[in-house]
Image (tube, rainbow, N blue to C red):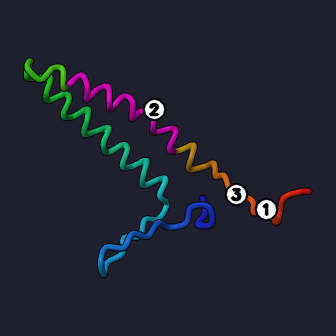
């Protein structure tokens, strides 16, 4: 993916700027990071029977995010661009 289809995202915080390049890849990495957190915390919670329900829910959330992963990758490869009315065929 080149810079023309994935332009940097710039967020301003006072006098500072956060520039995110290759945002779909960053989003995918962030998603993977949260999957790891949910499964790690869920695994630890299974050590305590009173937290078993919370552990199960964390595994469900993590499993759902495994479905999100290919969606992020697909969206990163497919871009829909609006065509200005002046370029429409008559």
Task: Determine the secondary structure under disc 1.
Answer: helix
Left or right, 40 with respect to 9, comes to: left
Q: Residue at x 70, y 57 (%)?
A: 82
**Mark whose residue sits in front, 1 or 2:** 1
Is most of the magenta stretch helix, strand or loop?
helix
How far, Cα to Cα, is label 2 from label 3? Answer: 28 Å
User: Few, some or many C-alpha atoms within 10 Å of disc 3 (few <14, some 14-19, many ≥20)?
Assistant: few
Residue denoted by label 1: 85
Residue corresponding to mark 3: 82
Against 28, residue 15 (above or below) is below
Residue 5 in percent (x, y) is at 62, 61
Verify whether residue 18 appears in magenta: no
Percent coordinates x, y for residue 52 in the rendering: 15, 20
Q: Which residue appears farthest toward the bottom when viewing the image?
A: 15
Percent x, y of residue 36: 28, 38
Disc 2 + disc 3, Cβ < 8 Å: no
Q: How many marks?
A: 3
**Precedes in sequence: disc 1 or disc 2:** 2
Instruction: Kindly report the distance in space between the C-alpha atoms of the residues bearing marks 3 and 1.
Output: 9 Å
Q: Quadrant of the N terminus?
A: bottom right
Q: CA distance from mark 1 to mark 2?
A: 36 Å
| Residue farthest along the right direction in this orientation | 90
**2 or 3: tag closer to the N-terminus:** 2
Q: Which type of secondary structure does the marked residue at label 2 adopt?
A: helix
Residue topped by disc 2: 67
Judge whether 39 appears above or below 53 on screen: below
Compared across the picture, whether 50 is left or right of 15 comes to left
Magenta stretch bounds = 55-72
């Amino acid at each position: 993916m080149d810079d023309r289809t994935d332009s940097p995202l710039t967020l301003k915080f006072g006098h500072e700027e956060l520039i995110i390049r290759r945002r779909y890849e960053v989003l995918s990495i962030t998603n993977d990071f949260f999957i790891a957190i949910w499964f790690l915390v869920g695994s630890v919670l299974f050590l305590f029977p009173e937290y078993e329900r919370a552990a199960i829910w964390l595994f469900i959330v993590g499993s759902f995010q495994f479905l999100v992963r290919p969606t992020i990758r697909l969206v990163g490869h497919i871009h829909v661009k609006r065509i200005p009315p002046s370029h429409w065929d008559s």
